[in-house]
Image (cartoon, helix red, strand yellow):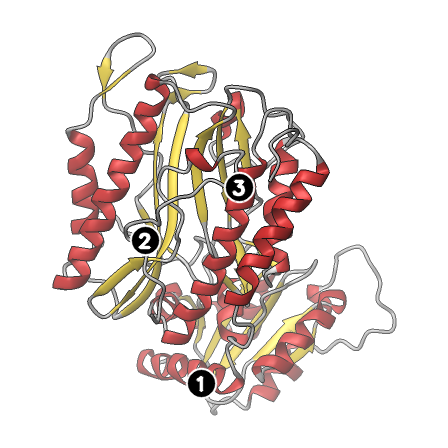
């Protein structure tokens, strides 16, 4: 591919077309969660409800926090309004929706086998839907066919997401003494994955690899951050990814102070350090890829130092994860290994001092029907339990080159490496093929590379 003028729509279109053509044959569009599998999920949750004395489970969702209802009823593409779901201790759940978004949620209900009801309380607040047929909560509860007597309701969505009006509806119907927040009930069940879920996330990460490779090739001086993001998003949508786990990240130059900022129309300048990331959603499940690069030239020695330190942290954490999987160790041993690596790390600041950079967040988080908002499964100093037999997680290691905005501590403001990985029994490997150091791929689609040494395709 010609390198004469790579800052053109034509070049970006050629990059995207070639990567789609290469990746498309690898995509298995038949992989999806079936009605039968949703029924098994309901039965599993209902057994946990019975064991804890609950007769009704409630979860809420929106375009931001869609994981719970996505997992329970296939609502992967909510639109506009907030929504909810009631699961009785026996039988099918009912999705609660507003009038407009309800049309989309009907499609999900058909796919999963759940029922659906429209409620006026879920509509856009200042609109009127004079032809909509709304049901009230009393009628919907009767449809659940609950056992006689007092009901005990488990709210399994986080209190940070639950709208007050949803809580008030439940309390008004069942009484405050019978409505309990029990997020762990559902979160711990969702944490353990099936082989089908791990395979679907492999597809999401195939799309992420191709899309990120396109972003790297499009990252040239003069391009806008949105130009680069657009290449990635075009590629992963061509490969069947219907939405994003987060707005695609392209933060160049001083915009690295934003850490996870979305792409803007800022122009990439020669010598800019840039952090990039994307998270395609494939049949409801999430892929990931994030890296830090330099535009137009390799990072200078001082700039490379922080990036290399992050790569060392990645190797430490993923190898500790593999050891924990092989030996069934508690996950906090992984956190301990990463912290021990940092304790011995010393880098040179812009002022010539030698200090340890700080990590902005924990090293590993859970994933599934959200990129990182599963509510349980992140690795911390306090997670004194081993990983489940089958899990999908994301290794998200980063170091900050600043403490306060506008005051650089290190020559690179922020460096990150994030990949998805899977565990099945004692095996644990990375989903993504791209290497830790992707700098040779910047602006060059023809550059060769060696696969991530921790990669293995799930199911191979």
Residue shown at the point (70%, 34%) measured from the top left: 8
In the picture, measured across the screen, residue 46 lies left or right of residue 173, that is left
In the rendered structure, find residue 184 and report the number of the disc placed on it: none
Residue shown at the point (67%, 70%) measured from the top left: 97
Quadrant where the N terminus lies? top right
184 shown above or below 35: above
In the rendered structure, find residue 445 and report the number of the disc placed on it: 3
Mark in front: 1 vs 3: 3
Residue at label 1? 89
Q: Is residue 226 visible?
A: yes
Query: Percent position (x, y) of residue 204?
Result: 49, 60
User: Marks 1 and 2, Cα distance to the nearest angstrom?
Assistant: 29 Å
Residue shown at the point (70%, 72%) measured from the top left: 119
Secondary structure state at the residue bearing disc 2: loop
Q: Is residue 63 visible?
A: no
CB-based contact (under 8 Å), mark 1 and mark 3: no
Residue at label 2? 378
Quarter of the rendering containing residue 322: bottom left
Query: Toward the viewer: 99 or 224?
Result: 224
């Amino acid at each position: 591919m010609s390198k004469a003028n790579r800052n053109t729509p034509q070049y970006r279109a050629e990059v995207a077309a070639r990567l789609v053509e290469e990746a498309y044959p690898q995509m298995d569009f038949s992989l999806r969660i079936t009605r039968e599998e949703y029924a098994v999920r309901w039965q599993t949750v209902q057994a946990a409800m019975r064991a804890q004395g609950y007769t009704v489970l409630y979860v809420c969702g929106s375009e931001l926090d869609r994981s719970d209802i996505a997992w329970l009823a296939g609502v992967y593409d909510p639109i506009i309004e907030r929504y909810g779901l009631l699961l009785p201790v026996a039988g099918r759940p009912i999705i609660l929706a507003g009038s407009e978004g309800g049309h989309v949620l009907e499609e999900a209900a058909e796919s999963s086998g759940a029922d659906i009801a429209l409620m006026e309380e879920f509509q856009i607040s200042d609109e009127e839907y004079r032809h909509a047929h709304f049901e009230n909560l009393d009628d919907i509860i009767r449809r659940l066919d609950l056992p006689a007597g007092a009901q005990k309701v488990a709210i399994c969505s986080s209190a940070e997401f639950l709208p007050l009006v949803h809580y008030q509806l439940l309390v008004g119907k069942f009484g405050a003494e019978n409505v309990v927040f029990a997020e762990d009930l559902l979160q711990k069940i969702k944490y353990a994955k099936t082989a089908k879920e791990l395979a679907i996330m492999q597809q999401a990460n195939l799309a992420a690899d191709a899309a990120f490779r396109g972003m790297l090739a499009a990252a040239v001086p003069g391009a806008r951050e949105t130009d680069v993001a657009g290449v990635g998003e075009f590629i992963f949508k061509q490969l069947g990814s219907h939405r994003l786990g987060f707005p695609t990240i392209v933060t160049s130059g001083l915009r690295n102070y934003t850490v996870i900022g979305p792409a803007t129309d800022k122009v990439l300048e020669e010598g800019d350090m840039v952090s990039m990331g994307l998270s395609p959603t494939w049949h409801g499940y999430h892929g990931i890829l994030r890296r830090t690069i330099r535009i137009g030239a390799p990072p200078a020695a001082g700039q490379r130092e922080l990036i290399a330190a992050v790569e060392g942290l990645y190797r430490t954490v993923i190898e500790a994860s593999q050891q924990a999987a092989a030996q069934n160790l508690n996950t906090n041993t992984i956190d301990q290994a990463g912290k021990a690596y940092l304790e011995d790390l010393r880098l040179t600041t812009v002022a010539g001092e030698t200090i340890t950079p700080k990590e902005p967040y924990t090293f590993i988080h859970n994933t599934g029907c959200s990129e990182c908002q599963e509510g349980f499964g992140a690795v911390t100093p306090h997670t004194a339990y081993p990983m489940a037999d089958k899990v999908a997680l994301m290794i998200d290691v980063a170091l900050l080159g600043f403490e306060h905005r506008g005051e650089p501590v290190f020559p690179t403001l922020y460096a990150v490496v994030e990949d998805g990985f899977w565990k099945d029994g004692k095996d644990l490997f990375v989903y993504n093929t791209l290497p830790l150091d992707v700098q040779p791929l910047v602006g060059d689609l023809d550059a060769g590379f060696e696969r991530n040494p921790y990669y293995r395709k799930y199911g191979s």
